[in-house]
Image: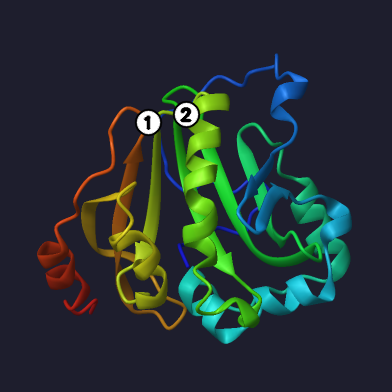
Amino acid sequence: MSVISLAKRPVMVSLPAQQEDTTVTSAYHSVYIKSGVYIVRNLIAADASEELLSWLNRADMLRGLNLSKVDFDLAQLSSFIAGFDNYYHYILGIFDSADDRLVGFYTIDVNRTHKTGSLTTGIGDTSERGKRTLWSTIDAILDHFYAERDIEKFTARILARNYAMLFNFKNNTRFTLEAHLKRECIAPDGKRVDLLVFASFKDTPPQIISHHALSHQEHQNDD
Protein backbone atom coordinates (compact mmCIF):
# COMPACT_ATOMS: atom_id res chain seq x y z
CA MET A 1 0.00 0.00 0.00
CA SER A 2 1.02 3.58 -0.34
CA VAL A 3 1.90 5.78 2.60
CA ILE A 4 -1.13 7.18 4.41
CA SER A 5 -1.51 9.79 7.13
CA LEU A 6 -4.34 9.12 9.55
CA ALA A 7 -5.30 12.66 10.41
CA LYS A 8 -8.77 14.11 10.10
CA ARG A 9 -7.71 15.87 6.91
CA PRO A 10 -4.70 13.89 5.73
CA VAL A 11 -2.30 15.65 3.36
CA MET A 12 0.11 13.41 1.50
CA VAL A 13 2.25 15.97 -0.32
CA SER A 14 3.32 19.35 1.04
CA LEU A 15 2.77 22.03 -1.58
CA PRO A 16 2.30 25.80 -1.33
CA ALA A 17 -0.87 26.75 0.48
CA GLN A 18 -4.05 26.87 -1.51
CA GLN A 19 -6.97 29.19 -1.04
CA GLU A 20 -9.97 27.48 0.52
CA ASP A 21 -12.74 27.35 -2.07
CA THR A 22 -16.06 28.22 -0.48
CA THR A 23 -18.03 27.65 -3.70
CA VAL A 24 -18.00 23.84 -3.64
CA THR A 25 -20.98 22.64 -5.63
CA SER A 26 -23.07 19.52 -5.17
CA ALA A 27 -21.32 18.00 -8.19
CA TYR A 28 -18.27 17.44 -6.00
CA HIS A 29 -20.07 15.88 -3.08
CA SER A 30 -20.14 12.31 -4.29
CA VAL A 31 -18.20 9.83 -6.37
CA TYR A 32 -19.85 6.76 -7.87
CA ILE A 33 -17.90 4.80 -10.46
CA LYS A 34 -18.81 1.45 -12.00
CA SER A 35 -15.74 -0.43 -13.19
CA GLY A 36 -16.17 -4.03 -14.27
CA VAL A 37 -17.41 -6.08 -11.31
CA TYR A 38 -16.60 -3.27 -8.86
CA ILE A 39 -18.21 -0.06 -7.69
CA VAL A 40 -16.06 2.73 -6.27
CA ARG A 41 -17.91 5.28 -4.16
CA ASN A 42 -17.42 7.66 -1.26
CA LEU A 43 -17.32 6.00 2.12
CA ILE A 44 -19.68 7.59 4.62
CA ALA A 45 -19.70 7.43 8.40
CA ALA A 46 -22.21 4.57 8.31
CA ASP A 47 -19.66 2.44 6.41
CA ALA A 48 -17.44 2.26 9.51
CA SER A 49 -17.31 -1.35 10.69
CA GLU A 50 -15.34 -3.69 12.88
CA GLU A 51 -14.08 -5.37 9.72
CA LEU A 52 -12.67 -2.10 8.37
CA LEU A 53 -11.07 -1.45 11.75
CA SER A 54 -9.47 -4.89 11.62
CA TRP A 55 -7.96 -4.11 8.20
CA LEU A 56 -6.33 -0.96 9.54
CA ASN A 57 -4.69 -2.92 12.34
CA ARG A 58 -3.57 -5.93 10.29
CA ALA A 59 0.20 -6.37 10.17
CA ASP A 60 0.55 -6.45 6.37
CA MET A 61 -1.66 -3.38 5.94
CA LEU A 62 0.28 -1.44 8.57
CA ARG A 63 3.59 -2.34 6.96
CA GLY A 64 2.37 -1.15 3.57
CA LEU A 65 1.01 2.11 4.99
CA ASN A 66 4.11 2.61 7.15
CA LEU A 67 1.99 2.91 10.29
CA SER A 68 2.04 1.66 13.83
CA LYS A 69 -1.21 0.25 15.23
CA VAL A 70 -4.23 2.44 14.50
CA ASP A 71 -5.83 3.00 17.87
CA PHE A 72 -9.36 3.84 16.72
CA ASP A 73 -12.67 2.64 18.09
CA LEU A 74 -15.73 2.42 15.86
CA ALA A 75 -16.96 5.92 16.74
CA GLN A 76 -13.55 7.40 15.98
CA LEU A 77 -13.44 5.58 12.65
CA SER A 78 -16.86 7.01 11.76
CA SER A 79 -15.63 10.49 12.65
CA PHE A 80 -12.46 9.97 10.62
CA ILE A 81 -14.47 8.97 7.53
CA ALA A 82 -16.85 11.90 8.00
CA GLY A 83 -13.87 14.27 7.97
CA PHE A 84 -13.27 13.76 4.24
CA ASP A 85 -14.95 16.61 2.38
CA ASN A 86 -15.10 15.07 -1.14
CA TYR A 87 -13.41 18.12 -2.61
CA TYR A 88 -9.95 18.44 -1.12
CA HIS A 89 -9.92 15.00 0.49
CA TYR A 90 -11.65 11.79 -0.58
CA ILE A 91 -11.97 8.35 0.96
CA LEU A 92 -13.43 5.91 -1.55
CA GLY A 93 -14.52 2.35 -0.93
CA ILE A 94 -14.09 -0.43 -3.48
CA PHE A 95 -17.20 -2.61 -3.41
CA ASP A 96 -17.96 -5.92 -5.10
CA SER A 97 -21.04 -5.04 -7.12
CA ALA A 98 -22.48 -8.55 -6.74
CA ASP A 99 -23.01 -8.32 -2.98
CA ASP A 100 -22.06 -4.72 -2.07
CA ARG A 101 -19.12 -6.06 -0.05
CA LEU A 102 -16.35 -3.58 0.81
CA VAL A 103 -13.05 -5.05 -0.36
CA GLY A 104 -10.63 -2.10 -0.34
CA PHE A 105 -10.22 1.66 -0.39
CA TYR A 106 -8.55 4.67 -1.95
CA THR A 107 -7.75 7.99 -0.34
CA ILE A 108 -7.13 10.99 -2.57
CA ASP A 109 -5.80 14.35 -1.43
CA VAL A 110 -6.16 17.23 -3.86
CA ASN A 111 -4.31 20.50 -4.20
CA ARG A 112 -6.83 22.65 -6.06
CA THR A 113 -4.32 25.40 -6.81
CA HIS A 114 -1.99 23.05 -8.67
CA LYS A 115 -4.69 20.61 -9.85
CA THR A 116 -2.82 17.61 -8.46
CA GLY A 117 -3.95 14.56 -6.55
CA SER A 118 -2.05 12.21 -4.25
CA LEU A 119 -3.42 8.69 -4.19
CA THR A 120 -3.21 5.96 -1.54
CA THR A 121 -4.81 2.55 -1.81
CA GLY A 122 -5.15 -0.76 -0.05
CA ILE A 123 -7.05 -4.02 -0.41
CA GLY A 124 -8.37 -5.26 2.91
CA ASP A 125 -10.41 -8.30 1.90
CA THR A 126 -7.92 -11.17 1.68
CA SER A 127 -10.24 -13.09 -0.66
CA GLU A 128 -9.40 -10.48 -3.32
CA ARG A 129 -5.79 -11.59 -3.54
CA GLY A 130 -4.90 -12.49 -7.10
CA LYS A 131 -8.01 -10.82 -8.55
CA ARG A 132 -6.19 -7.67 -9.74
CA THR A 133 -8.74 -5.49 -7.98
CA LEU A 134 -6.67 -2.32 -8.22
CA TRP A 135 -5.95 -2.93 -11.90
CA SER A 136 -9.72 -3.21 -12.40
CA THR A 137 -10.53 0.13 -10.75
CA ILE A 138 -7.65 2.58 -10.99
CA ASP A 139 -8.08 3.47 -14.68
CA ALA A 140 -11.71 4.38 -14.08
CA ILE A 141 -10.74 6.56 -11.12
CA LEU A 142 -8.10 8.40 -13.14
CA ASP A 143 -10.53 8.92 -16.02
CA HIS A 144 -13.21 10.23 -13.68
CA PHE A 145 -11.00 12.68 -11.82
CA TYR A 146 -9.34 13.94 -14.99
CA ALA A 147 -12.65 14.46 -16.77
CA GLU A 148 -14.91 15.54 -13.89
CA ARG A 149 -12.78 16.85 -11.00
CA ASP A 150 -10.35 19.24 -12.71
CA ILE A 151 -7.23 17.21 -11.83
CA GLU A 152 -4.24 17.18 -14.19
CA LYS A 153 -1.72 14.99 -12.36
CA PHE A 154 -1.80 12.12 -9.88
CA THR A 155 1.04 10.73 -7.81
CA ALA A 156 1.33 7.61 -5.70
CA ARG A 157 4.12 7.33 -3.13
CA ILE A 158 4.95 3.70 -2.40
CA LEU A 159 7.44 2.12 -0.05
CA ALA A 160 10.29 0.70 -2.12
CA ARG A 161 9.99 -2.62 -0.28
CA ASN A 162 6.24 -2.91 -0.74
CA TYR A 163 6.55 -5.31 -3.67
CA ALA A 164 2.89 -6.35 -3.63
CA MET A 165 1.75 -2.77 -4.20
CA LEU A 166 4.53 -1.95 -6.66
CA PHE A 167 3.10 -4.68 -8.91
CA ASN A 168 0.00 -2.51 -9.39
CA PHE A 169 2.00 0.47 -10.65
CA LYS A 170 5.20 -0.68 -12.31
CA ASN A 171 3.39 -2.43 -15.17
CA ASN A 172 0.52 0.06 -15.41
CA THR A 173 0.97 2.21 -18.50
CA ARG A 174 -1.04 5.04 -16.91
CA PHE A 175 1.84 5.64 -14.48
CA THR A 176 5.54 6.30 -14.87
CA LEU A 177 8.26 6.04 -12.26
CA GLU A 178 9.00 9.69 -11.49
CA ALA A 179 11.39 9.58 -8.53
CA HIS A 180 13.24 7.39 -6.06
CA LEU A 181 13.29 9.25 -2.74
CA LYS A 182 16.01 7.71 -0.62
CA ARG A 183 15.42 7.47 3.14
CA GLU A 184 12.38 9.67 2.73
CA CYS A 185 10.45 8.62 5.83
CA ILE A 186 10.84 6.81 9.13
CA ALA A 187 9.32 3.37 9.64
CA PRO A 188 7.66 2.39 12.94
CA ASP A 189 10.85 0.51 13.86
CA GLY A 190 12.84 3.74 13.56
CA LYS A 191 14.64 2.89 10.33
CA ARG A 192 14.59 5.30 7.40
CA VAL A 193 12.96 3.85 4.28
CA ASP A 194 12.88 4.69 0.58
CA LEU A 195 9.82 5.77 -1.38
CA LEU A 196 9.13 5.38 -5.08
CA VAL A 197 6.95 8.06 -6.64
CA PHE A 198 4.74 7.10 -9.60
CA ALA A 199 3.02 9.79 -11.65
CA SER A 200 0.09 9.92 -14.07
CA PHE A 201 -0.78 12.92 -16.24
CA LYS A 202 -4.09 13.92 -17.78
CA ASP A 203 -2.56 15.02 -21.08
CA THR A 204 0.00 12.23 -21.46
CA PRO A 205 -0.91 8.97 -23.21
CA PRO A 206 0.08 5.66 -21.60
CA GLN A 207 3.84 5.21 -21.45
CA ILE A 208 6.18 2.25 -21.79
CA ILE A 209 7.81 2.03 -18.39
CA SER A 210 11.51 1.30 -18.01
CA HIS A 211 11.36 -2.00 -16.14
CA HIS A 212 15.16 -2.19 -15.98
CA ALA A 213 15.34 1.10 -14.08
CA LEU A 214 12.53 0.09 -11.75
CA SER A 215 14.02 -3.34 -11.10
CA HIS A 216 17.31 -1.68 -10.16
CA GLN A 217 15.55 0.66 -7.76
CA GLU A 218 13.40 -2.07 -6.22
CA HIS A 219 16.39 -4.13 -5.15
CA GLN A 220 18.33 -1.35 -3.48
CA ASN A 221 18.38 -1.45 0.32
CA ASP A 222 16.39 1.16 2.19
CA ASP A 223 18.85 1.33 5.06
Is residue 27 shown left or right of residue 165?
right
Q: In the rendered structure, which amino acid carries the disc numbered 1?
A: Lys
Residue that badge 2 annotates: 151
Disc number for residue 73: none
**Eyeballing the image, is 37 above or below 32?**
below
Provide residue 117's location: percent of width, then percent of height. Answer: 47, 38
Q: In the rendered structure, which disc, 2 or 1, sits on the residue that comes first in sequence?
A: 2
Image quadrant in which you'd find residue 201: top left
**Eyeballing the image, is 42 above or below 186?**
above
Q: In the rendered structure, which amino acid carries the disc numbered 2?
A: Ile
Q: Please indicate, yes or no, whether residue 149 appears anywhere in the rendered image.
A: no
Residue that appears at 53% across and 83% down? 60
Secondary structure category for the residue under label 2: loop
Residue that badge 1 annotates: 202
Foreground mark, 2 or 1?
1
Residue that appears at 80% across and 47% down? 82
Is residue 73 shown left or right of residue 57?
right
Which one is nearer the viewer's eye here, 5 or 131? 131
Mark 1 residue crowding within 10 angstroms, few (<14) / some (14–19) / many (20+): some
Mark 2 residue crowding within 10 angstroms, few (<14) / some (14–19) / many (20+): many
User: Which quarter of the rendering shows the C terminus?
Assistant: bottom left
**Eyeballing the image, is 154 above or below 216?**
above
Provide residue 198's location: percent of width, then percent of height. Answer: 31, 52
Q: Marks 2 and 1: CB-CB under 8 Å?
A: yes
